[in-house]
Amino acid sequence: MAKAVAPEPGSLEERAVAAHRAYLDALVAWERTLHRMNCALCGPSDLSENERAEACDAAEAEKEAHRIAFRDLCDKLGFVPTGHDVALPAEDPSCCKSSASPR
Ligand SMILES: [Zn+2]
């Protein structure tokens, strides 16, 4: 695989890479929220069923907004920027699953 050159600051590609990072962050935050809201070990115990569902919906909406922003930038760019060190953020160490390997 060819080594990617760092995109020009402020360029469409750089914005797409930033949007990709934001999307992955939101994706992980969403998964974390889903887990927390359904976990007896690390989830908040003082939330009602409704509040849990709302927290999941809000996190999913956030994730979707970032996904769409990223996709739109990729559409404008004409390709999906890769090789810019975009990786999934580390697991939340406070979560009960943090020591388990991801799926
Ligand atoms: Zn948990």
Image: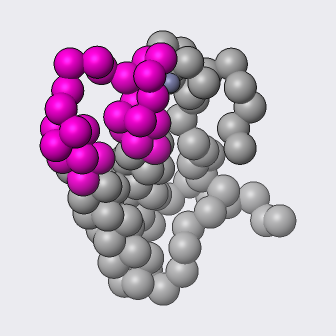
Task: Please indicate, yes or no, whether residue 31 appears anywhere in the rendered image.
Answer: yes
Front one among 79 and 47: 47
- Boundaries of the magenta span: 31-57
From where the camera sits, is residue 59 visible? no
In the displayed structure image, the side of residue 46 where residue 79 appears, left or right:
right
**Residue beneath the point at 32% across and 71% down:** 68
Tell me: residue 92, above or below residue 62: above
Would residue 35 be counted in the magenta stretch?
yes
Furthest residue toward top: 94
What residue do we see at 20% from left, 19% from top? 46
Query: On the picture, is 79 further left or further right than 27?
Result: right
Q: Quadrant of the N terminus?
A: bottom right
Give the tally of numbered discs: 0
Residue 81 drawn at (x, y percent): 56, 67
Q: Position of residue 72 (x, y in %)?
A: 33, 78
What residue occupies the far front of the structure in this picture?
49
Quadrant containing the C terminus is: top right
* Residue drawn at 68 percent across, 19 percent down: 99
Report the front residue among 37 and 66: 37
